[in-house]
Image (cartoon, rainbow, N blue to C red):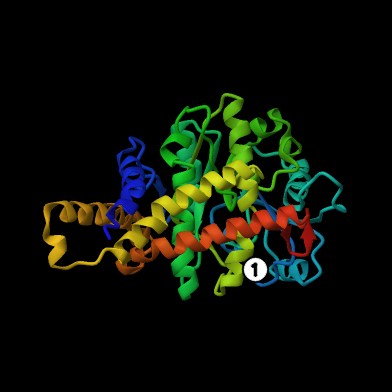
Amino acid sequence: MDTGWLALPGAMLWSVIIALPWQPWRIGETLKAMAGSMPDLSDITALIPARNEADCIATTLTALSQQGHGLNMVLINDESTDTTVATAEALHLENLTIINSPKLPRGWTGKLWALQHGLNLAETDKLLLLDADIELLPGTIAALKRKMQIEERQLISLMAVLPMRSGWERLLLPAFIYFFKLLYPFQLANSRHPLIAAAAGGCILLDRKVLIEIGGFAAIKDAIIDDCRLARKIKAAGYRTWTGLTQAAISRRPYERLTAIWSMVTRTAFTQLRCSVGLLVLCTLLMISTFVLPVLSLALFAPGPGNLALGNLTLGSLTLLPLLIMVLSYLPTVCYYQLHPVWALALPLSACLYLLMTWHSAWRYWCGAGPSWKDRHY
């Protein structure tokens, strides 16, 4: 039986993706640290919300202290029950202020509630929003500040390098970045396009006055995907944003087991689809068409004497086309993170796992579980 036609939807979709003028699969938007730079950073306040981050907070704060002179650091303790505060205090860092976030009120997410209280203390022109597990290499803030000034942007964010040591991390985390860029094309998000806005919440430098103008963190207080919501608010107010990849911001939170990655994705996947059944079905159909059917077509396409006919050769080409485009489009991401190119062949498996995570996220929502983070449920 000829099965090459199974690959037709995928061939059409991948042809469109590869031909998009904004080329979301390319690695074009990147930022490097300014090595050897120790600039004056007294016009920046770093806000670091932390909830039970004793394992990595010392690395994060020490790296911050080596970014330049005069950087103001505010660690907001978000009801931690471990030694986060004691670990930070033991560093005896200059310009570090530690405060406790008040009890979380209804209608706020914990991170945004903590950031709002950090904002109340900040008086500098710029704010650095930094997750407690992100280590910045020397010169990263200098590069962020320079780009913000030269390009006159009001928000700059960096997609931190995720750990890619275990097999699960290598299988799923580069694909996470790849799918994020397909969903939020950086070239469009960084343009004046009013409908596309993106940010990576782990590391954001922004103008404090602009943040206050849009209503502070209260304007997005209930957002689960708070980084992209913040970028949309800032673009809607007429300002400009930029987001890109970097090797200079490194996440120190491990995802060695599948369960850790599964938990991270299911927390926000259905929210990303606006909790819409229609969008979930559409997403499922697209994922099956682009990733499952081409592989199924190749598996069922039996080469042999009968397939030497012109028609069957055409079907064979149709079977291979979407797979070839798929792998070629994923290779730049795999290579950027210095992984072996063979990992590009695993994208269909990664896609299937992400689809399962999305359905699990929807199931949790329908069961009333909702998103959760560190024993806090929303």
Q: Answer whether residue 138 is visible to the viewer in this image.
A: no
Q: Residue 367 is drawn in which quadrant?
A: bottom right
Amino acid type, mark 1: Ala
Judge left or right: residue 135 versus residue 14.
right
Residue at 36% of width from left, 37% of height from top? Answer: 22
Specify the quadrant that holds the N terminus. bottom left
Q: Nearer the viewer, residue 92 or 131?
A: 131
Judge left or right: residue 227 versus residue 53.
left
Judge left or right: residue 153 versus residue 271.
left
Residue 107, percent across and down?
Answer: 82, 44
Q: Residue 343 is drawn in which quadrant?
A: bottom left
Residue identified by numbered label 1 = 58
Q: Which residue is most to the front?
A: 1
Q: Residue 154 is drawn in which quadrant?
A: top right
Residue 76, percent across and down?
Answer: 75, 55
Q: Answer whether residue 354 is visible to the viewer in this image.
A: yes
Residue at 56% of width from left, 47% of height from top? Answer: 281
Q: Nearer the viewer, residue 150 or 158?
A: 158
SS at mark 1 in the image = helix
Residue 324, percent across and down?
Answer: 27, 56
Judge left or right: residue 49 versus residue 340.
right
Residue 37, percent across and down?
Answer: 45, 53
Label 1, residues with CA under 10 Å away: few <14, some 14-19, many ≥20: many
Q: Nearer the viewer, residue 218 or 153?
A: 218
Residue at 66% of width from left, 31% of height from top? Answer: 209
Residue at 70% of width from left, 70% of height from top? Answer: 54
